[in-house]
Amino acid sequence: MFNPDSFRQVVEPPSSVPVAVDWAEVESRLGNALPSDYKWLVKNYGPGSFGGFFYLFCPGFSRDGLDLEYQHMRTTWALEYLKEAGHALPRGPHELISFGRSENGDVAYWVTSRSGNPDRWTVALGEPRGPLWEEFDGGTVEWLEAVLSRRTRMRIFPKDFPRRAVRFVSLT
């Protein structure tokens, strides 16, 4: 369970977030409900980067590179391609929905196969051009807080991420 106050202590939210999302419409197009902690993150932070390194995908964002639906389509295609090419994947392409990426191209996914309830989905992180895959037994905000506060170290991320003080840089 995520704690909004605890997350805000790790990363201060921007003063304003001019993002309005029709969640019912987005979820209908994706064919899946989305986690409530992710919706909270979009509402309170919006599109941007954490520590200048990890970027959150947001529905309807004007740049395809950070649009949730576009990136889900793109990453699903890439995973299907890799699977058809004979690469061993720890999860099937349709068990994953991407929600963010690092500056290095590492992709963060929700593992949807673990539960039909999006608030029980866990997080997986995959490197873009290699076999390394890591999973975190918690939700979006729990994972991000654990990484940004340095309680959890993702081997895929550079050793110097995150730096001591993590700032959120809004792209709106």
Image (tube, rainbow, N blue to C red):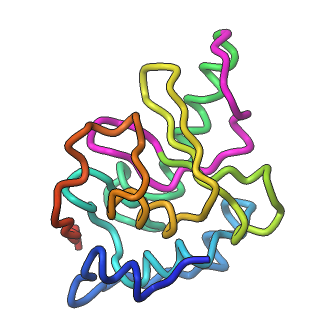
Identify the residue at horizontal 42%, vertical 21% (top origin): 129
Image coords of residue 8 (percent x, y)? 33, 83
In this rendering, the answer to whether 159 lies above or below 100 is above
Query: 151 or 128, which lies in front?
Result: 151
Magenta stretch holds residue 3? no
Quadrant in which residue 167 is drawn: bottom left
Identify the residue at horizontal 61%, vertical 61% (top origin): 138
Identify the residue at horizontal 30%, vertical 74% (top origin): 10
Q: Quadrant of the C terminus?
A: bottom left
Query: 130 or 157, which lies in front?
Result: 157
Magenta stretch holds residue 88? yes
Magenta-drawn segment = 86-107
Does residue 162 appear left or right of residue 138 in this picture?
A: left
Image coords of residue 11 (percent x, y)? 27, 75
In this rendering, the answer to whether 123 lies above or below 146 is above
Identify the residue at horizontal 34%, vertical 39% (top origin): 157
